Amino acid sequence: TGSAATLRAAGQESSGRILRSGAALPKSFRVPLPVPQVARPVSTAGGVDRYEIVQRVAEAEILPGLRTQVWGYDGRFPGPTIAGRSGRNALVTIRNELPVPTSTHLHGGVTPPDSDGYPTDIVVPKGWRHAPADSGMSHGGMHVAADAWSVSDQAKEYVYPLIQQAATLWYHDHRMDFSGPQVWRGLAGFFLVRDDEELTLPLPDGERDIPLMLCDRAFEENGSLRYPSLDPSLKGRPGVEESYMNGVMGDVMLVNGAPWPELEVTATRYRFRLLNASNARRYRLRLEPGGPLTQIGTDAGLMARPQELDAITLAPAERAEVVIDFSRWKPGTAIRLVNTLGKGRMREVMRFRVTRKVRDESHVPARLADVQPLTGARVAATRTFDFRLTWNSDGSSIWTVNGRPFAPDRSLAAPRLGTVERWRFTSDFYHPVHLHLAHFQVVARDGQPPGAHERGWKDTVDVRPYETVDVLARFQGYRGHYMLHCHNLEHEDMAMMANFHIT
Ligand code: C2O
Ligand code: CU
């Protein structure tokens, strides 16, 4: 695979093949940006917000004039946005009417273990006969003992106590061996947590607080989604196996499920909650022809203070909250959001068009939130997790953590509840490392300070080829089994995951 420098310089696109769509692709900036609907609770009695969401097959018009079958929460892609309140319980019942089992993970949630969306904690559809051995797109389920499965029939109530600060979280499918294809088909949505501290801030809100889910997809000629393992006609085609190994990328850029959309904005400030929900694609986002992105938040909360950046890098599952002040441009101006790691049309993401001047009462205060640096904390333990391709004796290779693929009954660490540990991640490729439950702060990349865009609470960190990344993680909330894994969804499906058990 070459030296670290070659791999990094090669950038994202040449490190994997991109699936090409057979369908005719639309012109850019013709489709208006959709904003996902906010879910309505079925009840708010007793300080508890109850939601009922049905996972089902639905049709969507993603490419103009074509019908695409999606698997969506409430049949939508992206799923409905759940608006949570810090300290208020949310109970979300997920009913599975899809043809396959699912597991729903609240990414960034401080969630009790039995509601965490563990890969083998599945909800099976009506009539599904669960055969523990029938998992396994890539590794045949051989690492999963039959008694590791916990099976709910048709529905499960997930408990989210939301004992955590305001943040942009998201929920998505996490089924063992199948997260890649199931998220690709549409199983992802936003879960926003708001708190009192945030609500006193004069940030743009209401219609000027917009979540942006970024992901890439490929399509068949008839409009259906194209994904290697879903499509037998792609099997054995050159490049397909290779693209699966490095993660699946497509040639259509979607924002909130719409291809290269446009958003009309007034000449005011807007708050955008950027989420990289792609299976494998990395982004380096900037405005063209230029202009600052004022970053106010990282994965797991607001930053201590805002900072002006001209580009923000997002690996899969990372979030960044930014404010863009459109009053710096004249009405009529079009500003593009681009991904400088993408080539050709994949360099374009979306476009903003400034319509008119209106009064704007919002601003970005110099102080946003209390972020206690963990660098002063007592470090209870230091551990290293190596994310790497490992060769089997028969010459095949697998993605591993510390040399082994995932096994539900094996735990690599047992941090104590309430402590802080230093975790070091090393890697041979692009591996976005995500911890369930624990939030962390990035303290060093190859011994250097972390990037400006990652100075705040995080739950996912972009680990690049041959890099060593140190984080300080706080193990808060609950005892029990949780996991860390690569959030390249194909690597995750190839068992690049490991357990830790909080005692
Ligand atoms: Cu967003 Cu374990 O995943
Ligand atoms: Cu990976």
Image (cartoon, grey):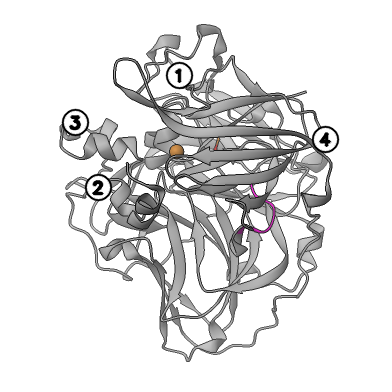
Gap between marks 3 and 1 measured at Cα: 30 Å
At label 1, which amino acid type do we have? Lys
- Whichever of labels 2 and 4 marks the residue nearer the N terminus, that label is 2
Residue denoted by label 3: 235
- SS at badge 1: loop
At label 4, which amino acid type do we have? Gly
- SS at badge 2: loop
At label 3, which amino acid type do we have? Lys
At label 2, which amino acid type do we have? Phe
- Whichever of labels 4 and 1 marks the residue nearer the N terminus, that label is 1
- The residue lying toward the viewer, choosing from 292 and 452, is 452
- Whichever of labels 3 and 2 marks the residue nearer the N terminus, that label is 2
Q: Residue at x 49, y 34 (%)?
A: 387
Q: Residue 475 colored magenta?
A: no
Q: Which residues are magenta?
A: 454-459
Gap between marks 4 and 1 measured at Cα: 40 Å
- Tell me if I can see residue 70 in this picture: yes
Q: Residue at x 70, y 79 (%)?
A: 363
Gap between marks 2 and 4 measured at Cα: 46 Å
Residue denoted by label 4: 418
- Whichever of labels 4 and 3 marks the residue nearer the N terminus, that label is 3
The residue mark sitting in front, 2 or 4, is 4
The residue mark sitting in front, 4 or 3, is 4
Residue 411 placed where, x, y %? 63, 20
Gap between marks 3 and 2 measured at Cα: 16 Å
- The residue lying toward the viewer, choosing from 48 and 186, is 186
